[in-house]
């Protein structure tokens, strides 16, 4: 299913009719959910992720370029820049992306 912009916020929010299936136990794969979200909406999105995580029923695998989403507290960050896929600390990722062209 392809979801864009604020649709993902509406889908994850408890007031949404579609929230029932999203709130079920599962692993959610999201590809650049920040693409059409302002920084303020990205922070709202992180809050929704946190709320779902706190239930113990949801885990997320997210492909993103957003430093806001990468800063999610307790996230394990993987980079695909190398032959192996190591987990790396956020501070190394941000310093690397800030210096690359």
Image (cartoon, helix red, strand yellow):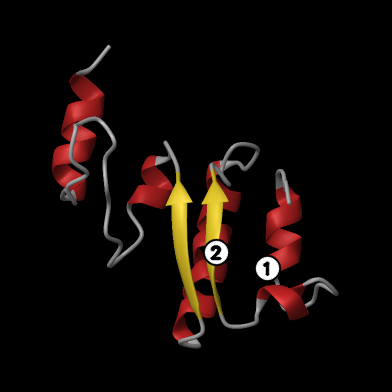
Task: Choose top left, top right, bottom left or bottom right for residue 31.
Answer: top right
Q: CA distance from mark 1 to mark 2?
A: 11 Å
Q: Is residue 87 above or below residue 16?
A: above
**Quarter-of-image position of residue 32:** top right
1 sits to left or right of 56:
right
Taking the spot 81% from the left edge, 71% from the top edge, the residue there is: 18
Q: Is residue 63 above or below residue 47?
A: above
Residue at 31 percent of width and 65 percent of height:
73
Q: Secondary structure at mark 2?
A: strand
The relative height of residue 64 versus residue 76 in the rendered view (above or below) is above
**View extreme (top): residue:** 101
| Residue 28 circle label | 2
- Between 82 and 77, the one lying in front of the other is 82
Which residue is at the far bottom? 55
Residue at x-position 45% and y-position 41% = 64
Q: Residues within 10 Å of mark 2 (few under 14, many from 20)?
A: few
Q: Pointer 1: what residue?
A: 12
Reading the chain from its start, which is encountered first: label 1 or label 2? Answer: 1
Closer-to-camera residue (14/81): 81
């Amino acid at each position: 299913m392809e979801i864009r912009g604020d649709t993902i916020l509406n889908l994850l929010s408890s007031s949404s009719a579609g929230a029932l299936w999203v709130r079920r136990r599962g692993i959610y794969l999201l590809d650049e959910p920040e693409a059409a979200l302002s920084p303020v909406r990205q922070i709202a999105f992180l809050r929704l992720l946190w709320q779902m995580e706190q239930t113990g029923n949801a885990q997320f695998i997210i492909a993103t370029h957003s430093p806001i989403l990468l800063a999610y507290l307790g996230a394990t960050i993987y980079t695909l820049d190398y032959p192996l896929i190591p987990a790396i600390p956020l501070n190394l990722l941000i310093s690397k992306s800030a210096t690359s062209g």
